[in-house]
Image (cartoon, helix red, strand yellow):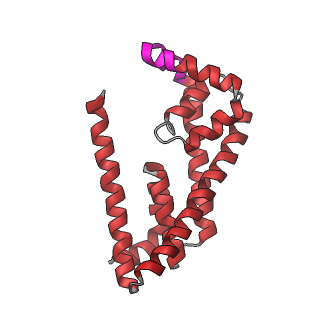
Amino acid sequence: MNFQQLLLEHGYWMLALGLLLEGETVLLLGAFGAQRGYFEPLAVFALGCAVAWSSDQTMFWLGRWKGVAVLARSRRLARAAVRARRLVRRWPHASVVGVRFAYGLRTAGPVLLGASGLPPLQFAVLSAVSAALWAGTFTTLGWVFSHALQQVLGYAAQAQLALLGLLVLAALAGWWFARRRKPRRA
């Protein structure tokens, strides 16, 4: 089975899994695949929204359930939580939307928001809005970038497919190296 056939048969599942692991890069690649005809553009956008919203909800409820206990274990986290609570109280809407776009806070942010006492319905609505803005932004950027890339390169379909494969490998390698370096910094 070649990559093109794998993409045609299981592309949306691969896209959903990739969005859970590394959101922006995979959404850009999904838009590239949509521009090439492997995906429906609206489906890439909808899948990006759904995965972003559901992961935010999961982390938010985890924060409401165990967030305070986890934060109490570490002084540094407790201090960060106090600052986060102040920001959430002062700017609740901007906090929820900003967490979706703040690289590195996408997992911890909803946990902190859940532990901060933000009302669940308010978070759910704002999270849906931020997921739609985020997915729309990166799907559009991926579409425009892929169109510009095709204009500049002008390669045949095989070269573009190979480039897509290289981009996927580069994204996975970057994700792997980033995950591998995090424990060393702590």
Q: Residue at x 50, y 20 (%)?
A: 80
Q: Is residue 6 left or right of residue 118?
A: left
- Please indicate, yes or no, whether residue 116 appears anywhere in the rendered image: no
Q: Is residue 146 left or right of residue 164?
A: right
Q: Nearer the viewer, residue 61 or 52?
A: 52
Q: Residue at x 35, y 70 (%)?
A: 165
How many marks can you see?
0
Q: Residue at x 45, y 57 (%)?
A: 25
Per the image, is 143 magenta?
no
Location of residue 112 in the rendering, given as x and y in whole percent from the top left corner: 56, 27
Q: Main secondary structure of the magenta part?
A: helix
Name the outermost residue toward the front.
Answer: 152
In the displayed structure, 160 sits above or below 136; it is below
In the displayed structure, 37 sits above or below 171; it is below
Location of residue 95 in the rendering, given as x and y in whole percent from the top left corner: 64, 33
Q: Which residues are magenta?
A: 66-80
Name the outermost residue toward the left.
Answer: 184
Location of residue 153 in the rendering, given as x and y in whole percent from the top left corner: 40, 80
- Please indicate, yes or no, whether residue 54 appears anywhere in the rendered image: yes
- In which quadrant will I find the N terminus? bottom left
Per the image, is 77 magenta?
yes
